[in-house]
């Protein structure tokens, strides 16, 4: 078994390229037996003019109208028939912010395998974004931002809606070192509670490789300290995500993630079906990806 990739953005998102079929094709070539699509669902009305859209057949449609979801799921179903060797899971990466629950309601009727929660924004501003992070700093100090962030993460977990928590320390891609350090030290005392909640709620902690291959950080989201803390608190359930926005990024750097996860004390990677845990694949059964075909 290869490690399933549980964080993938096909071209329904405007910041991604590669169709569902392209991803399945590449997964098959690399010997991946399972991948889970997690297209973006950003429902914040304040950010809607910029982010409230999805791409369907080349056209821009408002993401609040659930009609695109039928198409998304249909495309996954059709692609399943073309690639019977790759299990394709249906998922979403949901941007979590206060009040999202009611807006999310109409989307919960669909047959999701896996719902991934992400906190990207505080006060409608993207924490990890250079410009928006600076704007946010003009409104409140880094400690306050970190506490609000932790508060939203806890609310996301306690909402009972999600199966996994994406890129927990995502903010560390912020290039302002002062902001990053202050944010980190303010978040640290919150981590034990967050990770314990995850465990109690039966949710998975995601290890996200994008930090390494896209943002040139030395460690994934989250880093080895948080992974060790999670493991020492008895959290066993983890997923691996490339957060790929292009099929060539599928399962990228998963060998690095695997080594870190094992070092932190984790024993297996988890898969989901219909919003429930499907299985735990022990690390002892993991085999390397096949080499890419020569160009
Ligand atoms: Zn994200
Ligand atoms: Zn993502």
Image: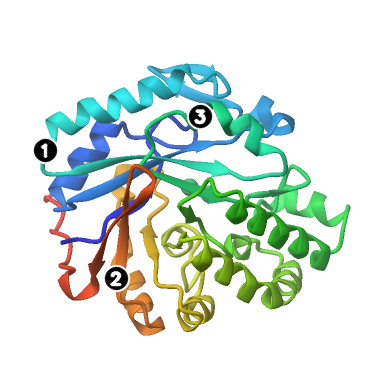
Q: Secondary structure at mark 1?
A: loop
Q: Position of residue 96 (x, y in %)?
A: 62, 45
Q: Nearer the viewer, mark 2 or mark 1?
A: 2
Give the Cα separation between the discs numbered 2 and 3. 30 Å
Q: Is residue 180 above or below residue 157?
A: below
Disc 3 crowd, CA 10 A, few/some/many (<14, 14-19, 20+): some
Label 1: which residue?
84
Asked whether the viewer can see residue 295, the reply is no
Give the Cα separation between the discs numbered 2 and 1. 24 Å
Q: Position of residue 252 (x, y in %)?
A: 32, 58
Q: Position of residue 87 (x, y in %)?
A: 20, 44
Disc 2 crowd, CA 10 A, few/some/many (<14, 14-19, 20+): many
Q: Secondary structure at mark 3?
A: helix
Check contact, mark 2 vs mark 3: CB within 8 A.
no
Label 3: which residue?
107
Residue drawn at (45%, 52%), measured in percent from left and top? 163
Q: Nearer the viewer, residue 41 or 133?
A: 41
Label 2: which residue?
268
């Amino acid at each position: 078994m290869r490690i399933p990739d549980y964080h993938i953005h096909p071209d329904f998102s405007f910041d991604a390229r590669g169709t569902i079929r392209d991803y399945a094709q590449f997964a098959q070539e690399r010997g991946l037996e399972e991948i889970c699509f997690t297209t973006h669902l950003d429902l914040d009305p304040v950010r809607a003019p910029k982010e409230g859209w999805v791409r369907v057949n080349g056209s821009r449609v408002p993401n609040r109208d659930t009609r695109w979801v039928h198409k998304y799921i249909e495309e996954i179903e059709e692609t399943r028939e073309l690639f019977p060797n790759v299990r394709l899971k249906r998922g979403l990466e949901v941007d979590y912010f206060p009040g999202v629950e009611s807006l999310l309601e109409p989307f919960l009727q669909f047959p999701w395998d896996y719902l991934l929660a992400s906190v990207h924004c505080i006060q409608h501003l993207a924490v990890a974004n250079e410009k928006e992070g600076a704007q946010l700093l003009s409104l409140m100090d880094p400690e306050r931002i970190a506490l609000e962030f932790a508060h939203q993460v806890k609310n996301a977990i306690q909402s009972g809606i999600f199966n996994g928590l994406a890129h927990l320390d995502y903010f560390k891609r912020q290039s302002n070192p002062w902001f990053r350090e202050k944010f980190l030290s303010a978040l640290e005392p919150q981590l034990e509670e967050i990770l314990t909640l995850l465990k109690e709620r039966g949710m998975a902690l995601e290890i996200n490789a994008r930090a390494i291959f896209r943002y040139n950080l030395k460690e994934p989201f989250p880093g080895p300290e948080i992974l060790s803390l999670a493991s020492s608190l008895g959290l066993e359930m983890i997923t691996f995500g490339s957060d790929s926005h292009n099929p060539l990024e599928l399962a990228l750097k998963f060998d690095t993630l695997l080594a870190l996860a094992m070092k932190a004390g984790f024993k297996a990677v988890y898969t989901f079906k219909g919003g429930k845990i499907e299985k735990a694949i022990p690390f002892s059964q993991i085999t390397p990806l096949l080499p890419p075909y020569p160009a």
